[in-house]
Structures are given as C-alpha cells and as structure tokens.
Amino acid sequence: MAQLVIDIGNTLTKIAVFDGEELVGAGHYPVVMDDDLGHLFINYYITSAIISTVKKEVEPWVGYLEQRCKVTYFNREMAYGIHNHYRTPQTLGADRLAAVLGAKSLYPGSDCLVIDAGTCITYDGIDAAGNYYGGSISPGLQMRFKALQHYTSVLPQVEADAGFDKFYGDDTVTAIRSGVQNGILYEVLGFIQSYSKQAESLNIILTGGDSVFLDTVLKNSIFAGYIKTEPYLVLKGLNAAIQEHND
C-alpha cells in the first residue's frame, strides 16, 4: 500500500508516492490534470493521500482524488513533535511547517535550519528539542530579477547564472546579476551565521526549486561541508505527518 503526498505551491504542485517511509516516485506539475493522478493510481496501489497547500482556492482535481482514496489535509495539529511558538500559528504557511517537520524526521534530536528556495526564500529553524520559534520570508531568486525589470523603466530582464562568481558587475546585466545573486548569497550566509551562534552543531538543509542553484553558489563558503540538499524535504515532512496520523 502506498501514500500519495501532494504539496501545492505558488508556482508548482509537487507530488510524491511513498511506500511507508520510502520515496518511490516524485514529479512536479505546473498544472495537475485528472489523468496525471490516474496514471499514479495505475502504477501504484495508493490507499491514502495528504495535501498541503499555500492557496485558498480548491484545485479542480481534488474531487477526482477524493473519489479514489482517503484524503487528509495537512494542518498544524498534524505536526507531531513540533512545539510551535509562532505568535500567529494560524498564519504559518503549511509548507514551512511541513519543511521543519521533514527536518525533524530526518535529523531527530538535532538543531536544523531549513532554507527553502522557491518563489520566496524562507528560513526556518527548529532546535534539538523540537521547538519552532519562527522564521523569515524573503523574495526569491526569480522574483528579484523580475522586480528590477518591472519596477523600473530601463533595466532589462536578466536570467540567473550559477557560474557568475564576481562580487561586482562590469555592465548593466552583470551588475543586476551581481546584486541579485550576491545579495542572496550574503543574505543566506548571514542567516546561517546567526543560527550557528545558537547551536553547537547545526544541520543546514536546502530545499525548493532553486536549492541546486543555492548549493552551487555556496560551494566555496565556510559552511559548504555542513549543507545538505533535500529536494523533497516538504514532501518527506508531509509523509511523516500522514504516517503518524494513520497509526
């Protein structure tokens, strides 16, 4: 028997199939169709599903899914073992909570910093005792590039380049690239340094669509050896939740 784990984000919907704790299949979709889910039911014996979403509206394919298996919607009460000290827990994004739950399940009894590089970049820490006090939300890589073009009259749209390694640009395109990419680099390093001061040993976990890019630009940092990339961290957190919920 398998579980379907679904994370509906701002840009993409990530879907994974787990057999117990083992990830046996995963994909991401700009738009999910009933046929996409149908293929999964053909290939796997799926008996239950869990959905996490950052959107308010209900996706049209949810009804199809509810006809095929038991569907659970992730909520903060399902974050077992997390002591949530967020002042407004009802406003905490489900993806952020699932990410720290994933970190806790992968590295139990350890201090963790989750850096989720997607549409936004979020920084969320959890200590060895499972305490979550809050985090930070910042514009993501593509959002920064697009904002410079959108809110000015002359600056061009620029694409990211993981191979860019100067601390300055010598024309407008590379100046934008330096400002955005180095700005993110210095921001990430600053957060890591702040969290490292609070923990003797800190697991730094990168996830999200731009995690590979971040991993690349951080390769020469003093923290490089401590950084782990977990592209399916949120999905693993959701799977941990449904495993506990079904026990």
Image (spheres, rainbow, N blue to C red):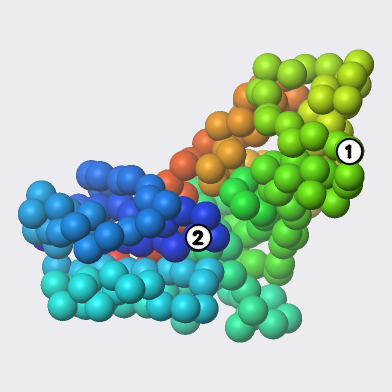
Q: What is the quadrant of residue 204 in the picture?
A: top right
Labels 1, 2: front one:
1
Observer-nearest of 150 and 191: 150
- Compared with residue 5, is residue 145 higher up or lower down, i.e. above or below? above
Q: Measured from the top left, where is residue 56 in percent x and y?
A: 51, 78
Residue that badge 1 annotates: 154
- Compared with residue 61, is residue 239 higher up or lower down, i.e. above or below? above
As drawn, is 6 to the left or to the right of 119? left
Q: Residue at x 29, y 70 (%)?
A: 61
The reply to whether dot 1 and dot 2 touch (C-beta < 8 Å) is no
Which amino acid is tagged 2? Answer: Gly
Q: Measured from the top left, where is residue 158 in percent x and y?
A: 73, 32
Q: Residue at x 47, y 78 (%)?
A: 57
Residue that badge 2 annotates: 9
Disc nearer the start of the sequence (1/2): 2
Q: Residue at x 42, y 52 (%)?
A: 30
